[in-house]
Image (spheres, rainbow, N blue to C red):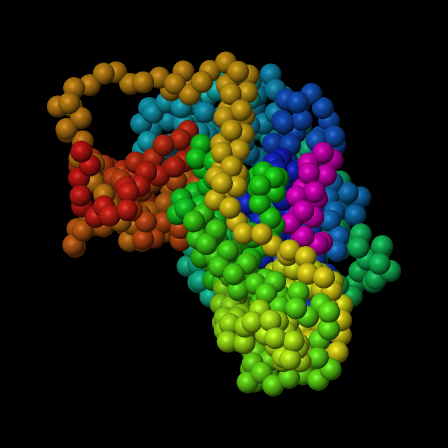
Amino acid sequence: MAQRRILVTAALPYANGHIHLGHLVEYLQTDIWVRFQKLRGHRCIYICADDTHGTPIMLRARKEGRSELDLIAEMREAHISDFSSFEIEFDNYGSTHSDANRELCAEFWSALREAGLVREKSVSQLFDKQAGVFLADRFVRGTCPKCGAADQYGDSCDKCGSTYSPSDLKDPVSSISGTTPEVREAPHLFVELEALHDFLEEWTQAGEHLQPEIANYLKGHFLAEPLRDWDVSRPEPYFGFEIPDSPGNYWYVWFDAPIGYLASTREWCERAGEDFSDWWKNPETEIHHFIGKDITYFHTLFWPAMLKTAGYTLPKKIHIHGFLTVNGEKMSKSKGTFVRASTYLEHLEPAYLRYYYASKLGPRVDDLDMNLEEFEAKVNADLVGKVVNLASRTARFAAATGLSAAYPSDGDLFETAAAQSESIAEAYETGDYNRAMRDIMVLADRANRYVERNAPWELKKDPDRAKELQDVCTVALNLFRQIVVYLSPVLPRLAKQTAELLGQPIERWNEVETPLIGTPVGKFSRMLDRVETKKVQAMIEASREEQAESQSANEQEAGSPTLKEEPLAAEITIEDFAKVDLRVARVEAAEEIPEAKKLLKLTLSLGGDETRTVFAGIKAAYTPESLVGRQVVMVANLAPRKMRFGVSEGMVVAAGPGGKEVFLLSPDEGAQPGQRLH
């Protein structure tokens, strides 16, 4: 097998927050893939960095009374600690706020300028005079200019679904200072993406760079019409890199963040004595990006356009994954299911999560659900009951004699498992970890049946059967090691423990083909404990307490708890309430409206052939793919409302202040579409 040169990246975590279990889906998925490639003998490096620029970083630093540099340094240390605790090994972990990134941003910018792709346009924005900053849409609230609904964001109305410019908002208030902002015009720089339309269509539809569902999504939602110009600058004040040929303007965070992949690689090259061009300007190098589906647009359109224009190697593949849900729902701070990586580590082993995620991840863009009961049961049954159990039941009997000098007859168990090598490797290669874990556990079941049949604990009782005991333990421990080789990308600590037990490091995938013979066996030490329900519950409770403390601190600082921000409405009678017809509905279809910033178009089934079309302002919180098949609550007798994008025939019921903090209400299991809520 020819050696490949592979450069792998995971999306850069934002320096404004801590790593949580949702983030870890991606970093563990990528780490497993990289470890597999290295085990196969390929040259493979894993590159990442902190994403450090933008208004939120600047505002948080101001709020906390410190510099942005101090803030991002602290968050970098926390991120690296979390990643290393989960055995995620980067070859280099950089920062977008680095000299290397500044230089590369200037190089990309010059290429875009020389290609004639940059143009300047005046943009009207609301400006907070007290804070001294231009306000992004999410930092301003006011009254909808169309329907008069209060407390709406600066770009669209959650009540009527209308979209508008922040400058059109009535009675606008800055979320930062609480003052009334003023309208100011500022020049922004745009990249004319449409000039690369033909290239982007060809690249995205080539069939090898993207999953089919992503390619189809891009073709239907973006490439079917002219591509919008991309706003790549922000006026001062802004924490980032000032644009050299446009004083007072800064590159938008989504311009310099992906270039951070190259900057972090350059740092590694300088340290390792490698040629940077071999990794980013060489068609023989495979570049693989792993990202979440929420940043598909940036990585599949903007990023290839930037690389193409600047003369760098395009990605061989962009691997896109779905979101993490817990117990079938979005992660919830109030329920304690929004769990920080550091909180998890206070209660549970990293190996549990590495294996559980691997057992759920497939090659598609499906969301991954972490059912806590299943998490406990699967880890205990598979890792403890099947894999580690093989060693714990046999190693102590082999410690005195070591392994047999010749490999005993085992009914072709070792040979059969070795024959699975390429099939399991193909599952890893394509990101189908779920299939790989299933196939490996089949081998573990067979090995355990062998141990049960031969009962080494019984053989130990008869001194005349000592050779037979040694042979049985030799077979069992070789089958155990073979399984651990297959699992080593997922469970690197177990691989090290196995190496210590059997005196042979696990370094190559093809070690599954050759059994160990005549080697000593060390003293068995407990490899992995069972998951305890009380520890899972303690983790959830600790996360809930963290949220309560954080909310309390925020409320004290703001001086206004939730009910004060949004007081209870005027009292109504039961007759008034009876006029509202709330029904259970199933989402049959969901699609984006590209020109709408907050709306998704939903097709809701009320049972039988009865359907309704509803436009819902939940785009920031939910992807269309995550909604299909889900049951929601809708207001079914709301008068149809004609909107810019069509007629909305009802309303879905949700809680939260808006934007990303929107939470759809769902009925309990067993409810049927069309049933009325009482």
Residue displayed at 63% across by 59% down: 491
Q: Which residue is more in the foreground, 153 or 481?
A: 481
Question: x%, y% of residue 585?
Answer: 24, 46
**303 left or right of 666?**
right
Q: Which residues are magenta?
A: 73-90
Estimate the x, y position of residue 566 in percent, counting from the top left: 38, 20
What percent of the width, then of the height, locates residue 283? 71, 70
Q: Residue at x 53, y 24 (%)?
A: 549
For this orientation, the residue located farthest to the right is 273
Left or right of 303, for residue 650: left
Q: Residue at x 51, y 68 (%)?
A: 441
* Magenta stretch contains residue 243: no
Q: Which quarter of the picture shows residue 563?
A: top left
Residue 621 location (% of width, % of height): 44, 41
Q: Nearer the viewer, residue 426 or 460?
A: 460
Quadrant location of the N terminus in the rendered image: bottom right
For the question of whether residue 85 can be seen, the reply is: yes
Q: Is residue 355 above or below residue 14?
A: below
Residue 303 in sight from this viewpoint: no
Majority secondary structure of magenta residues: helix
Identify the residue shown where x is 52% and y is 41%: 535
Q: Quadrant of the C terminus?
A: top left
Q: Residue furthest top?
A: 559
Residue 291 lies, with reference to residue 392, above or below; the image says above
